């Protein structure tokens, strides 16, 4: 068995695989209608702090992408930052319970034999549903499973990578078209 490097954590992806990342390798992308709501360097430092929390403070060797994302979201919203500036108390309360994010694998399976033709309209509808709920973080999980299903393969290929990029770009475009909220973010895992 290969031992994990001392400065790495195993990130458990939604597809079941685990990938080792160091704090420097963790990248965070926050997409909003008018660009990122936080300074890029600040978000990178916050991600490193969350990484340190799990690795050093909690003594964890593995963490799910969902756990990491949730912790990072709490840090960013807990500091109540907008464009890198510390603000006063939050004026509006957060929604009590956020519905689970969209399952891309399920959307792909429900598309049946029509594949991408019915997948993309279903995907846009799911994004609209989450936006209508007033969520500040729009979430989608199961990207790899979804892509492999749509491509019709069990292994990751160049065609898979191309479709993965197409889906993420489509989601970015839909989010920009559906919302004018500058602090709305999207997570695709």
Image (cartoon, rainbow, N blue to C red):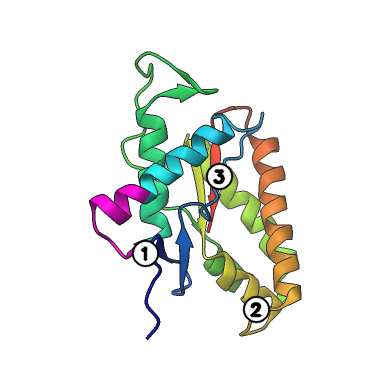
Image mark for residue 80: none
The residue lying at 68 percent from left, 37 percent from top is 176
- Residue 69 lies in the magenta-colored region: no
Between the residue at mark 3 and the residue at mark 2, the CA separation in whole angstroms equals 24 Å
Report if the CB atoms under discs 3 and 1 are less than 8 Å apart: no
- Residue 62 lies in the magenta-colored region: yes
Q: Earlier in the sequence, mark 2 or mark 1?
A: 1
Q: Is residue 110 visible?
A: no
Q: Which residues are magenta?
A: 52-63
Q: Earlier in the sequence, mark 3 or mark 1?
A: 1
The residue lying at 31 percent from left, 36 percent from top is 96
Judging depth in this view, the residue of 122 and 181 nearest the camera is: 181
Which secondary structure, mark 3?
strand
Q: Is residue 148 visible?
A: yes
Which secondary structure, mark 2?
loop
Callout 3: few (<14), some (14-19), or many (20+) C-alpha neighbours within 10 Å? many
Q: Earlier in the sequence, mark 3 or mark 2?
A: 2
The residue lying at 58 percent from left, 45 percent from top is 29
Judging depth in this view, the residue of 147 and 1 nearest the camera is: 1
| Disc 2 target residue | 156
Between the residue at mark 3 and the residue at mark 1, the CA separation in whole angstroms equals 31 Å
Callout 2: few (<14), some (14-19), or many (20+) C-alpha neighbours within 10 Å? few
Callout 1: few (<14), some (14-19), or many (20+) C-alpha neighbours within 10 Å? few
Image position, residue 173 (x, y; %):
72, 44
| Disc 3 target residue | 186
| Disc 1 target residue | 6
List the single residue furthest toward the top: 88
Judging depth in this view, the residue of 87 and 187 nearest the camera is: 87
The residue lying at 69 percent from left, 56 percent from top is 121
Above or below, 113 against 54 in this view is below
Q: Is residue 165 left or right of residue 109?
A: right
Image quarter in which the N terminus is found: bottom left
């Amino acid at each position: 068995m290969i031992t994990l490097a001392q400065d790495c954590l195993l990130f458990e992806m939604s597809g079941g695989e685990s990938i080792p990342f160091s704090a420097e390798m963790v990248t965070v992308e926050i997409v909003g209608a008018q660009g990122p709501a936080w300074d890029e360097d600040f978000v990178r430092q916050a991600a490193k702090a969350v990484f340190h929390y799990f690795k050093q403070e909690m003594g964890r060797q593995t963490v799910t992408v969902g756990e990491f994302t949730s912790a990072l979201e709490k840090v960013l919203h807990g500091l109540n930052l907008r464009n890198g500036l510390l603000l006063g108390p939050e004026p509006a309360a957060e929604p009590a319970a956020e519905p689970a994010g969209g399952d891309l694998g399920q959307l792909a399976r429900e598309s049946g034999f029509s594949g991408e033709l019915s997948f993309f309209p279903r995907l846009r509808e799911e994004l609209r549903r989450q936006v209508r709920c007033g969520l500040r973080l729009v979430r989608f999980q199961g990207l790899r499973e979804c892509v492999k299903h749509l491509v019709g393969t069990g292994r990751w290929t160049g065609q898979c990578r191309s479709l993965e990029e197409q889906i993420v770009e489509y989601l970015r475009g839909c989010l920009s078209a559906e919302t004018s909220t500058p602090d709305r973010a999207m997570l695709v895992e």
